[in-house]
Amino acid sequence: MADLIEIKVPDVGNVENIDVVDVLVKPGDAVKLEQTLAILETDKASMDLPASAAGIVQELFIKAGDKVSEGTLIVTLLPTEAAPSSVAETEEASVAVAEQPATPAVVAAVETVPAAVEVKAEPVPANASGKAAHATPAVRLFARELGVDINKISTGSGRKGRILKDDVKKFVKKAMTEGTAPSGSGIPAMPSVDFSQFGATEEQKLSKIKRLTGQNLSRVWLNLPMVTYHDEADITEMEAFRVALNAEKSKDEVKVTGLVFIIKALVAAMEQFPQFNASLSADGEKLILKKYVNVGIAVDTPNGLVVPVLRDVNRKGVNELTAELAEKSGKARLGKLMPAEMQGGCITISSLGGIGGTAFTPIVNAPEVAILGVTRAKMQPVWDGKEFLPRLMLPLDLTYDHRVIDGVEGARFMAAIKQYLGDIRRLLL
Ligand code: CAO
């Protein structure tokens, strides 16, 4: 009998105690040169351990779960020349062959040992025996990134059921069409519907802004526990002042809108409640308080919603802010805003007041912690203790990240905004 060939773990670069994730051969298997015998995994990478010679596996010295280092004996092989000309001639080999599916290709493979290893086994369930899925770290990471529990993929198309990237992609595709795809939060995806079965349809590609906004809104919606608090501010005097101010302006001058006063009131309240001018650190452990006050304004454009940022608002007056708001919203509508003009916001205002509405629930523009929604002001009878008075009431909606802002803080913040809007002289204090 020819000498057995020992196959050991080669030099893998000073790494000890490498995990054996899977062993792909068993005694009696015919292996060819470079065939993967086992899969090893360090905390940084996964590697296939190739056969440095061809032959029939005589003895196996490792199993999944073992730890190996350079020089650890893996298998002994009977050299191919010394092996029986047909695997069927050895009991162990016939066991190995019996596991191959009976396709014409396999039948041909049984006739000669080297050819036998050319045959790819049919995919087998990767976790049929409750074992962890058989996949490399890269494939596991890929699955994790797509929110897929790799153990749910029952069949890998790689050797011995190893799960490949393509298997993960197929799993996602199947789940999407069946409407069962898990998102990162385990939420089933929306099923795809063929609307043409109900009538004529037309497809319109979403603008890039809409697609990006959509992604961001979904991320915020899933990550932030948000609360929206609604209230009304009495802006009767503020409006009278605004009208008087605009009456003084020449035809060419930009008119002051109520939004500028809302910006000023919001910023004054932020100075009073600094937790509203903050962001949560990515690990959720710290609050990053900002010493500057920049306000983002949601602007409706033909291409979708954009949020230009007005900088250092606390240092600017009503006229300067009026001019800046007109300039930035004009640029936004023409699609001419530079990326830097949309960055660095501390809080956002979403005003639908020019259109209508009584209340809505804006979504926080994270990593900011709050957003102020504004809808249409209207005259209302307000009871002053003695009589009903006609007052111009402005509906306000404050959505905040409840991880940072408590309900009481939200209510106090809103009360401060109302106070500033109710008597804008207080902005001077
Ligand atoms: N109540 C009553 N009237 C209001 C009002 C309110 N809350 N807000 C604005 N108006 C009035 C203005 O006074 C103006 O009236 P006149 O034409 O008589 O002067 C008119 O409505 C139009 O105002 P405007 O919208 O041009 O100006 P603005 O400063 O209030 O708003 C901007 C500027 C850029 C915010 C706005 O033009 C815009 O794009 N709004 C849409 C915002 C949006 O899409 N938000 C996203 C929602 S989803 O989160």
Image (tube, rainbow, N blue to C red):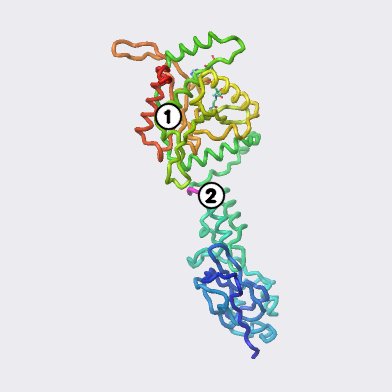
Identified by mark 2, the residue type is: Ala
Q: Height in image: 262 above or below 69?
A: above
CB-based contact (under 8 Å), mark 2 and mark 1: no
Classify mark 1: helix, strand or loop: helix
Question: Residue 253 occupies which quadrant of the picture?
Answer: top right
Residue at the disc numbered 1: 271
Question: Sequence-wise, which precedes: disc 2 or disc 1?
Answer: 2
Mark 1 surroundings within 10 Å by alpha-carbon count, few (fewer than 14), some (14 through 19), many (20 or more): some
Checking the image for residue 213, the label placed there is: none
Which of the pair 96/279 is nearer the observer? 279
Q: Position of residue 312 (x, y in %)?
A: 52, 28
Q: Position of residue 396 (x, y in %)?
A: 43, 25
Report the magenta stretch's main SS: loop
* Discs 2/1, front: 1
Q: Position of residue 197 (x, y in %)?
A: 61, 38
Which of the pair 297/110 is nearer the observer? 297
- Give the quarter of the figure containing the C terminus: top left
Question: Residue 254 occupies which quadrant of the picture?
Answer: top right
Q: CA distance from mark 2 to mark 1?
A: 45 Å
Instruction: Please give left or right for residue 66 compared with residue 112 in the image.
Output: left
The tally of labels here is 2
Magenta segment boundaries in residue numbering: 180-185
Q: Height in image: 261 above or below 14?
A: above
- Give the quarter of the figure containing the N terminus: bottom right
Identified by mark 1, the residue type is: Glu
Residue at the disc numbered 2: 181
Q: Is residue 181 magenta?
A: yes
Q: Is residue 262 magenta?
A: no
Q: Position of residue 372 (x, y in %)?
A: 46, 28
Q: Residue at x 52, y 33 (%)?
A: 345
